[in-house]
Image (spheres, grey):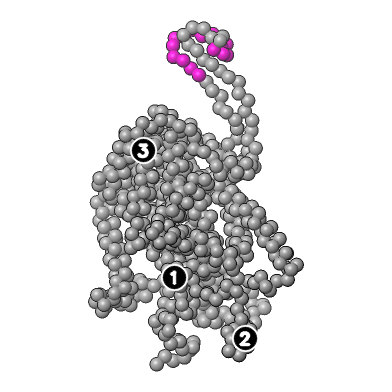
Amino acid sequence: MIAGAAGQRPLQPPGTGHTRPPAGHGGCGVVPGCTPWLEGPPRLFYPGELGCWARVQSICVSLLKVPLMFGFLYLFVCSLDVLSSAFQLAGGKVAGDIFKDNAILSNPVAGLVVGILVTVLVQSSSTSTSIIVSMVSSGLLEVRSAIPIIMGSNIGTSVTNTIVALMQAGDRSEFKRAFAGATVHDCFNWLSVLVLLPLEVVSGYLHHVTRLVVATFNIRSGKDAPDLLKIITEPFTKLIIQLDKSVITGIATGDESLRNRSLIRVWCGPEPPQVRAAGGLGAPPNCTSPGHCSGNSMESLHNVTRQKCEHLFTDTPLPDLAVGLVLLAGSLVVLCTCLILLVKLLNSLLKGQVAKAIQKVINTDLPHPFSWLTGYFAMVVGAGMTFVVQSSSVFTSAITPLIGLGVISIERAYPLTLGSNIGTTTTAILAALASPGDKLASSFQIALCHFFFNISGILLWYPLPFTRLPIRMAKALGERTAKYRWFAVLYLIVCFLLLPSLIFGISMAGWRVLVGVGAPFLGLLFFVGLVNALQARSPGRLPKWLQTWDFLPAWMHSLQPLDNLITRAALCCTDRCRSPEGWDEREGAARDKARLGLDNPALSYPEEMPGPALRVGSPRLPPHGATRL
């Protein structure tokens, strides 16, 4: 900064006088190491600093970056589609087998877990929902038993954007915001299930409401759900892989003839139709058209030319599992590359006044009398965008990098995500309306169950500010992940694999065992949450020994011991991988410094510091190594 004449203020570039983030979005004041929840990318250049040619060059480069960004976004969406196909190839038949056992699905808790695991396996709530609709339509599954599975599919679909958030782990502040923005979806779904699943088991709330709606309206079969985004993405993804999803549905509905059939589509084109009319025998054996048939029996056969599908794996000798693993690896590489390049492009495009303008448009509330409608307007936007792309996973995964960059706040991402949940159910409703007449009522009722589940969750966790627990839970997860980045992987494994599997195993032992284990666990969880809230807001109401968790062993209330263990294991692995040659004193000193934690950015967080968090106007903390008096 260049000082001006005596008595004048230092010269500053225009528009940089106010650097604090907007109120209500996690401004940190002067707390060292605190990362604001809403923070735009830094401004690199000011218009006055560039010459004429440099300015023209900068504008041309920026204009070239825009189509490049849309190209990477297109590849990003296509990679999500291929990723879903890869999971279906690797685990689709297993998912179909899971749905076959009606004894398991009649248990509500087991049905919930099946919905989670199957949706995680196939990476598509649309696929798992279509299987459920097919089973209900064919009479293999009752609507009441299918409702918990629908709830589970709602939870399982949120794993995709959580995986996308892992790609921003390189920067702690971006990772903190991105992971919080991704897990706000998980928190909403889990909290909604904790309330609505017991309510559904006791009262049949969703079953009765949706049956009343179906009985009230004269529902008629309509057209197929419109393919909007798929018109753009399918020409590319069809060149990579094409699947016959009816195989998974057929296995789930008990068709054993499809068990050894590959999911990879080989022949494309219309199926050869065959029309039969009931009646007696008497048609000639060479009857090829209705005009040449005689007698009471008529059979119309048509010659249909079918051709081989044109994609990479049409004539592959590899089994479905091997093809799925190849596509899984390839799609993850493309997904990570596109996401990293997208974040870099957005970082370079959204600078200075542009970032401030976008933040102001997205995160500013409506004028005063209607400010309370801002969140509901965001829900409408989220629902509309999800209806266009026909996938809540695609929409939430697309906004996750923007949350990480600080362009969209967590408070605004929450209603957008809720709207996305509504948008994906409207697509399912349109798909149900395309069902045949005999299957229409049950298909439409299941789609409505999905819709009313999300509406009920919104009524529980959004209208009043103090009920927006998912935001606070997601921020806590983001803070924890910013300090211990390995926690994100642990969260994914526990929430989407270990915990559902454990609940599934306990539920299969009977409802007495489930209540005996689950009730104390939920009671302990509620007690810990209540004590944590009182410790943060009014610790004086608690007994002195309960005002902190220090009376417990460190491993019971802190991740630091586990972090030390993981760090020590990583350092040992690094030491073994290094060769003794080329190891000089400088590298040894750097290693020792890292082991002591002196170069660990996580130590700058307020709760890792030896004293209380610094507030605006409070005296400075003593320098590192100084003795506190």
The residue beneath circle 3 is 445
Image location of residue 72, percent across then percent down: 62, 54
Region rendered in magenta = 275-290
Is residue 568 shown to the viewer in this render?
no
Circle 1: element type: loop
Q: Main secondary structure of the magenta part?
A: loop
Image location of residue 154, percent across then percent down: 41, 49
Measured Cα–Cα span from mark 1 to mark 2: 30 Å
Residue 3 numbered mark, or none: 2
Is residue 537 shown to the viewer in this render?
yes
Circle 2: element type: loop
Residue 280 inside the magenta-drawn segment: yes
Q: Residue at x 24, y 75 (%)?
A: 541
Residue 291 numbered mark, or none: none
- Which-is-in-front pick, marks 1 and 2? 2
- Which-is-in-front pick, marks 1 and 3? 1
Q: Earlier in the sequence, mark 2 or mark 3?
A: 2
Label 3 neighbourhood size at 10 Å, few (<14), some (14-19), many (20+)? Answer: many
Q: Residue at x 36, y 57 (%)?
A: 462
The residue beneath circle 1 is 23
